[in-house]
Amino acid sequence: MAQVPAFKLNDGNAMPQLGLGVWQVPNDGAAAAVKEALAAGYRSVDTAAAYGNEEGVGTGLRAGRVARKDLFVTTKLANDRHGYDEAQRAMDESLQKLGLAYVDLYLIHWPVAGSDRYLDAWRAMVAMKEDGRARSIGVSNFTQAHLQRLVDETGVVPAVNQVELHPGFTQRALRAFHAEHGIATESWSPLGQGASLQDPVIGKIAARHGKTPAQVILRWHLQSGLIVIPKSVTPERIRANIDVFGFELSAEDLAAIDGMPDGKRLGPDPDVFKG
């Protein structure tokens, strides 16, 4: 069984560097995928209120029969719950659906363009960390400007910013800001929604190592100091995605992937997305 390295967060907690994502997976599919992932050695699962599958994730966690202390569960605050009191209630609803007393990481899912209510949500999440319902708190899809305002107005630095990141969209400037402030970068859509798998640069590296393109890309994330949450509901791919700790990319491999031209983001732009 794979041993996933722990990634130390700025609040002293640690999370597995590789986990399972369940975006666009229905409840029953999420339950099966989570159970399969736990059997394969995953200990980190990433969901969100907006995914509508927290109940399924909870079912899968219970079916997996892994001790709670060995699990790392992330969920996210929905965009329409950014007020202080609304965020508090939203957290309790998520915990009930998951069947948990706390989550290991709670994220603001999007900053929501044209609104600054994420500041109230963040203050609520600081309180949740203090009362133990969230072990760590962070954000998702925040730009440098959003992060700076959050820190300036509350004094609390997020532990994590989960953002779209994959070969061809590497977020170099944002990652530099994260590094400066001790914020962990977590990659969603780490395989570029499948597009990166077809790139000839990736294909050549995969052939040289005897690995799949997906395994090479996930290895690139890991060796680049990123936390990564590939999504799959297929048992074979779930197992393959965690089978990335028995090889290393060379400096030349990493440079080749880093050197791929940056293109357009595949998901919404946080500066305009209202949810």
Image (tube, helix red, strand yellow):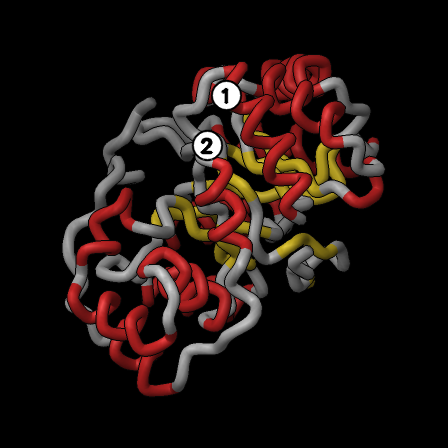
Q: Position of residue 252 (x, y in %)?
A: 32, 86
Mark 2: secondary structure: loop
Three-letter residue code for mark 1: Gly
Cβ atoms at labels 1 and 2 below 8 Å apart: yes
Question: Within the image, what quadrant is residue 56 found in?
Answer: top right
- Given the image, on which type of amino acid does mark 2 rest? Val
- Number of residues whose C-alpha sits closer than 10 Å to that of mark 2, classed few (under 14), some (14–19) or many (20 or more): some
Dot 1: element: helix
Q: Residue at x 28, y 49 (%)?
A: 192
Which residue: 77% across, 23% down?
Answer: 100
Residue 75, x across and y down, in percent = 59, 31
Q: Visible in this render: residue 152? A: no
Q: Is 204 placed left or right of 111 in the picture?
A: left
Q: Name the residue under label 2.
A: 233
> Can you tell which quarter of the image residue 55 is in?
top right
Q: Report x, y in % for residue 40.
A: 63, 45
Viewed as shown, does residue 22 lie left or right of 60?
A: left
Residue for badge 1: 29
- Give residue 165's mark: none
